[in-house]
Amino acid sequence: MGCTVIIGTQWGDEGKAKMIDYYSQKADIIVRYQGGANAGHTVVVNGKKHVFHLIPSGILHKGTICVIGNGVVLDPVQLIEECQLLEKEGIDVRKRLYISDAAHLLLPFHKEMDAAMEEARSNKIGTTKRGIGPCYADKCLRVGIRVGDIFDEEYLKERLTTALTVKNIQFERCYNRKGFAFKDIYDLLMQFKSYAGNLAINTPYYLNTEAKKGKNILLEGAQGNALDIDHGTYPFVTSSNPSIGGAIAGSGINPFLIHEVVGITKAYVTRVGEGPFPTEEKGEAGEIIRQRGGEFGATTGRPRRCGWFDMELLKHTIRINGITTIVLTKLDVLSGFEQIKVAVGYSVNGKKIDYFPSAMQDKIVPLYEEHPGWEEDISQCTSFKELPKNAQNYVKFIQDSLQVPISIISVGPDRNNTFEMK
Ligand code: IMP
């Protein structure tokens, strides 16, 4: 297996958690490299639902080491909560979790700022209000507080005083909100230090050393390529790089150690929050997909917008990330449609284009092809051969158009509703 990266190829919620869980069976170490508690990973094991926001879902595999990389914005309150929950379930999380000492800490004022900015915007992004944008903004402004800072109390006090002075002025004058007391944040950081401080290590050193020893490492992306701050539908994106660049920068892994880049791809498309979505189906078909697919956000509970498979979006993701193999998820949700639409090209302002444009994405008009659907429930299928002919044709059509092998198909939420293409 070597070093494998898992990337969401659409707007997130492609079913990455289930596939990370699947790949985790062979992994020694699982790394999260970007995002924060905006992600919601739902894994079903033996019918029991587990939702994670921060800790890699691979923690459910006994013996697997999990790492929160430097590219993640780490909410200490959330981390403590998730650890406590897992420990209650009998999972020895703090014996198998490392945290990068270079990861930025996401603090209560980041969440407050996220909410304040979102409220003030006329053109809302529809963020998860988990503080992601403001925390990454502080990182770029070089005023952020990192995990490693909590071990030097004088330095920490100075950093926190500087950060709060500016932020409290902003809260009070710009957003008419109350500022934060130094003591409250400092105490929170000290609580985090005593609960999880011993998990902090230099993760690039650890990961590269272990990789060279031959350990199998899985790098798990949160969100998806279309939410990438550089390659997505800016400004309706998240504030990090879910794409391959984020995997390298956010973990510190030597890029030449990466063997495989797996693109997790839903058999249709969804997005949460605002922003361009060329193949969105606002009518009955969209509602059918939402209900059948249970398309409601794991973090916010918001109904997801639903639509048809978009080939141009996938080609864009494959191009940028060097996707070597595709996992096709939720194929079962499409059962029962007489015809299934697939966008096979775009036109913008009446002109055909063969790429996903960086600007004027709201002007994209998808050019559709229709494929005959299938009636049968396919959730119990255990091989490609068992799929109805039209479902086989749909899969083959996607694979041939993308020119990337589809290696695994998922036809239901449980670990067992998955088969390899042979
Ligand atoms: P933020 O990441 O909370 O700043 O939100 C920015 C955009 O990314 C919003 O449209 C969110 O709905 C979307 N988003 C963030 N995290 C996820 C996720 O894990 N799945 C799907 N969409 C997400």
Image: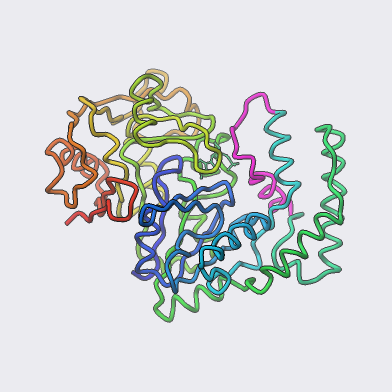
Q: Nearer the viewer, residue 109 or 353?
A: 109
Q: Quadrant of ligand 1?
A: top right
Q: Nearer the viewer, residue 376 or 197?
A: 376
The residue shown at (38%, 27%) is 279
Q: Is residue 230 visible?
A: no
Q: Quadrant of the N terminus?
A: bottom left
Q: How is the image coloured?
A: rainbow
Q: Is residue 53 visible?
A: yes
Q: Relative to residue 229, is residue 304 drawn left or right?
A: left
Q: Is residue 107 magenta?
A: no
Compared with 144, 353 (above or below) is above
Name, please, the residue furthest toward the bottom: 213
Q: Quadrant of the C terminus?
A: bottom left
Q: Position of residue 86 (x, y in %)?
A: 54, 62
Specify start and end residues of the magenta stretch as a single range: 121-142
Q: Position of residue 85 (x, y in %)?
A: 57, 59
Q: Is residue 131 magenta?
A: yes
The residue shown at (26%, 40%) is 332
Q: Position of residue 68 (x, y in %)?
A: 56, 63
Q: Nearer the viewer, residue 81 or 276?
A: 81
The residue shown at (76%, 61%) is 189
Q: Position of residue 151 (x, y in %)?
A: 76, 71
Please tell me in which quadrant of the rendered image residue 343 appears.
Answer: top left
Q: Relative to residue 177, is residue 303 drawn left or right?
A: left
